[in-house]
Image: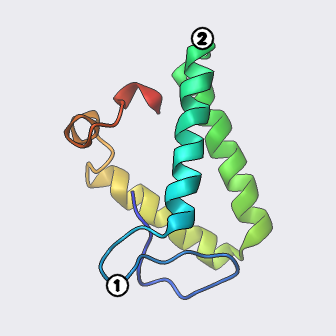
Amino acid sequence: MSFDPGQEGQRGEQKLGQDGSVPAELSHAGAVVDKAIEYMLGEGLPPLAVASALLGGSLGLLARTMDQTVMTRMLENAIASVQAGELHPANDRETGRDPGRG
């Protein structure tokens, strides 16, 4: 899943670089989340509980920091990524991500 480069800049909203690169803040935040996921799974929490907690926290943050139109576009982009198979475990293996983490 990626940013929607067509989105207008809103409060705190990130956009992909012109070369398709990920902004440094997104890369850093992603690394922190990956470590948190690794920690929670290491503590024996079920993947569904971890994913549900992260999704709930993410939705809460989005609701506090952007309007409904932008939030809806982000969620529609996420749905499109799922429907396109971008989040399939086979894709995680190809990119080296651990499919058991989400």
Check disc 2 and report its element: helix, strand or loop: loop
From the top left corner, tell me how far across and down residue 40 is, in percent.
62, 23
32, 80: nearer the viewer: 32
Check disc 1 and report its element: helix, strand or loop: loop
Q: Amino acid at mark 1?
A: Gln
Q: Amino acid at mark 2?
A: Gly
Other-residue count near label 2 (Cα within 10 Å), few / some / many at <14 / 14–19 / ≥20: few
The mark found on residue 2 in the picture is none
Query: Which image quadrant is residue 22 in?
Result: bottom left
Query: Which residue is label 1 attached to?
Result: 18
The earlier-in-sequence mark between 1 and 2 is: 1
Are dots 1 and 2 in contact, CB under 8 Å?
Answer: no
Q: Residue furthest bottom?
A: 8
Q: CA distance from mark 1 to mark 2?
A: 40 Å
From the top left corner, tell me how far across and down residue 41 is, in percent.
56, 20
Query: Which residue is label 2 attached to?
Result: 44
Residue appearing at x 42%, y 84% in the figure = 6
- 14 up-or-down from 84: above or below: below
Residue appearing at x 33%, y 45% in the figure = 87
From the top left corner, tell me how far across and down residue 98 is, in percent.
36, 30
- 67 up-or-down from 94: above or below: below
17, 6: nearer the viewer: 17
